[in-house]
Image (cartoon, rainbow, N blue to C red):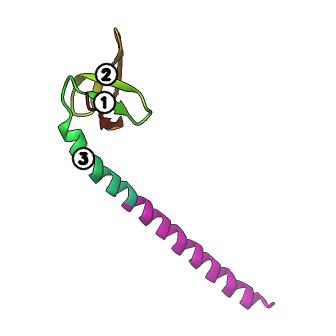
Amino acid sequence: MTLENFINVSIFVAIDLAIVYVAYLIMGFLRMRKQKNEFAPLHEQLKVGQSVMLVSGIHGKIKTLNEDVATLEIADKVVIKVSRFAIHSINEV
C-alpha cells in the first residue's frame, strides 16, 4: 500500500466516522425533543395536592409548585424539593 492510498483510505474512514457521529447527534436530539413534547401536557396539568410519581420511582403529594421546583411530601413530615421536570406521572387516587 502506497502512502497515497493510505491517506485516501484514512480520509474515507474519517468522513464515515463523522457522518455516523452527526447521525447519532441528530437522533439523540430528535428523541429528546419528542420526549419533551410528550411530557409538556403533564407538566402543565400539575396542581398542588396531586399525588405524583417521580422518574426515580418515588411517590409523593405536591405541597408547593413553581415554574422549576416542586416540593413533595413523601411521608408524614418528610418533604423533599425536586425539579418539576422529574415528575413522571400523576397518580390516580
Q: Of callouts 1 and 2, which one flags the residue occurring earlier in the amino acid sequence?
A: 1
- Badge nearest the viewer, 1 or 3: 1
- Badge nearest the viewer, 1 or 2: 1
Residue 44: x %, y % from top left = 19, 40
Q: CA distance from mark 1 to mark 3?
A: 15 Å
Residue 61 to residue 33: above or below: above
Count of numbered badges drawn on the protein: 3
Considering the numbered disc 2 on the image, is that residue within a helix, a strand or a loop? strand
Say which residue appears at 58% left-offset and 77% top-offset. 16
Say which residue label 3 marks.
40
Q: Residue furthest right?
A: 1
- Which disc number belongs to residue 72? 2
**On-image quarter of the C terminus:** top left
Q: Of callouts 2 and 3, which one flags the residue occurring earlier in the amino acid sequence?
A: 3
Say which residue appears at 44% left-offset and 59% top-offset. 28
At label 2, the amino acid type is Leu
Residue 49 to residue 42: above or below: above
Residue 18: x %, y % from top left = 54, 72
Residue 4: x %, y % from top left = 72, 90
- Which disc number belongs to residue 52? 1
Q: Left or right: where does residue 16 sit relative to residue 49?
A: right
- C-beta proximity under 8 Å, tags 1 and 2: yes
Q: Is residue 4 magenta?
A: yes
Q: Indicate the quadrant where residue 91 lies.
A: top left
Q: Which residues are magenta?
A: 1-30
**On-image quarter of the N terminus:** bottom right
Question: Residue 17 versus residue 53: which sits nearer the camera?
Answer: 53
Q: Left or right: where does residue 22 sit relative to residue 70?
A: right
